[in-house]
């Protein structure tokens, strides 16, 4: 699934044999059927050789996967079926009703209510009191280093200026879970807490499960997505955010290029040249992110609220049915399983 070699497990075949992984099949036979020319078995490569057909989870992921695995002998075709989310589970019913009725006032009022409800959770967890009138950015998902939760903090002085502006203020909230032994991700999580603890418009939440995830999508104005391109296979949190009137501010990776109309239904952070070292990519993309916020998004939210609402509604319209799970299930049946 993950478009990086380190994320695709490989084990010594002798160890696997000792643990009865091959169910008694002789090693010579394992080598023959799995087309092994070394002493290790790569799970992904073996699966691609045994399968009739495989699928990536976005069009970009498909391109990356075919480039990554296509030169190996005997693999199956890799098609793309983009991930999706269940609207019935995720979308707020009152908000959806207002959108369907084309009642802008009701939509705005319900969004404000949802922000207030979410901010009660923030206050209970952190003691931070947030304002539902203020533009609110949320970064929330699995905490993996490549997802770069701290990208917005890279130019910290500029970030502090953004969240400390009393004329056009911005609130930022993070949440997510690192894997227990992913110490790089754990360090990022802890550093965000340390660096933002004295900023009155910032908060970091714990206990990121389905319920909190839903509340964060309902209570955010902007859904921040900052993976290092092209390492995001799909990413789906922005889909459910859009269903709840939260606009994606995102690197164009995973599912986003199939959805995005920059400035119309989302805001794109231009990614750097993939050939650059990671530190330089992060510098470029952090600058691009803050520029998008400072020059485009924040002024639109405060000075052109009707235009911002237009972007919100375009996102709600464009996310369904294309990124709703009914389409995905149909494609799996028709393109993969049939």
Image (cartoon, rainbow, N blue to C red):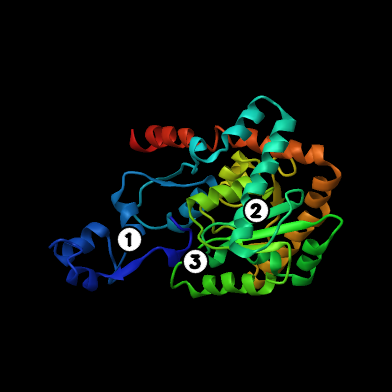
56 lies above or below 39 = above
Q: Residue at x 62, y 74 (%)?
A: 191
Whole-percent x and y of residue 23? 15, 61
Question: Which one is in front, 204 or 332?
Answer: 204
| CB contact under 8 Å: marks 1 and 2 | no
Q: Residue at x 54, y 59 (%)?
A: 231
**Left or right placement of residue 334 versus residue 313 in this view:** left
Mark 2 secondary-structure assignment: helix
Circle number at residue 178: 3
Task: Identify residue for label 2.
Answer: 119
Residue ID for mark 1: 43
Q: Tag 1, which secondary structure?
A: helix
Q: Is residue 116 visible?
A: yes
- For the N terminus, give its image quadrant: bottom left
Query: Residue 173: which disc?
Result: none
Other-residue count near label 3 (Cα within 10 Å), few / some / many at <14 / 14–19 / ≥20: some
Left or right of residue 54: residue 146: right
The residues bearing labels 1 and 3 have C-alpha atoms spaced at a distance of 24 Å
Give the Cα distance between marks 1 and 2: 44 Å
Q: In terms of sequence position, does the residue under pointer 1 or pointer 2 come before the other? A: 1
């Amino acid at each position: 699934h993950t478009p990086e070699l380190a994320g695709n497990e490989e084990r010594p075949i002798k160890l696997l044999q000792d643990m009865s992984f091959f169910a008694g099949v002789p090693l010579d036979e394992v080598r023959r059927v799995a087309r092994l020319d070394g002493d290790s078995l790569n799970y992904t490569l073996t699966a691609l050789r045994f399968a009739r057909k495989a699928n990536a989870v976005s069009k970009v992921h498909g391109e990356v996967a075919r480039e990554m695995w296509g030169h190996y002998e005997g693999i199956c075709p890799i098609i793309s079926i983009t991930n999706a989310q269940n609207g019935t589970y995720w979308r707020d019913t009152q908000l959806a009703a207002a959108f369907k009725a084309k009642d802008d006032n009701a939509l705005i009022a319900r969004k404000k209510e949802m922000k207030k409800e979410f901010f009660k959770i923030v206050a209970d967890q952190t003691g931070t009191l947030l304002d539902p009138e203020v533009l609110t950015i949320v970064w929330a998902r699995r905490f993996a280093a490549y997802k770069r939760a701290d990208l917005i903090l890279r130019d910290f002085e500029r970030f502090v200026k953004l969240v400390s502006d009393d004329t056009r203020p911005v609130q930022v909230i993070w949440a997510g879970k690192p894997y227990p032994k992913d110490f790089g991700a754990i360090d990022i999580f802890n550093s965000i807490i340390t660096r933002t603890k004295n900023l009155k418009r910032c908060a970091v939440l714990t206990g990121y499960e389905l319920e909190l995830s839903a509340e964060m999508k309902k209570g955010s104005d902007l859904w921040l997505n900052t993976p290092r391109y092209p390492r995001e296979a799909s990413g789906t949190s922005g889909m459910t955010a859009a269903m709840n009137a939260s606009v994606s501010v995102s690197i164009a990776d995973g599912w986003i290029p199939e959805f995005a109309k920059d400035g119309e239904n989302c805001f794109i952070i231009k990614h750097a040249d993939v050939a650059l070292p990671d530190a330089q990519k992060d510098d470029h993309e952090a600058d691009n992110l803050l520029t998008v916020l400072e020059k485009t998004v924040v002024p639109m939210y405060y000075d052109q609220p009707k235009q911002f609402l237009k972007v919100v509604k375009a996102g709600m319209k464009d996310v369904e049915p294309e990124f709703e799970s009914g389409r995905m299930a149909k494609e799996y049946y028709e393109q993969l399983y049939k």
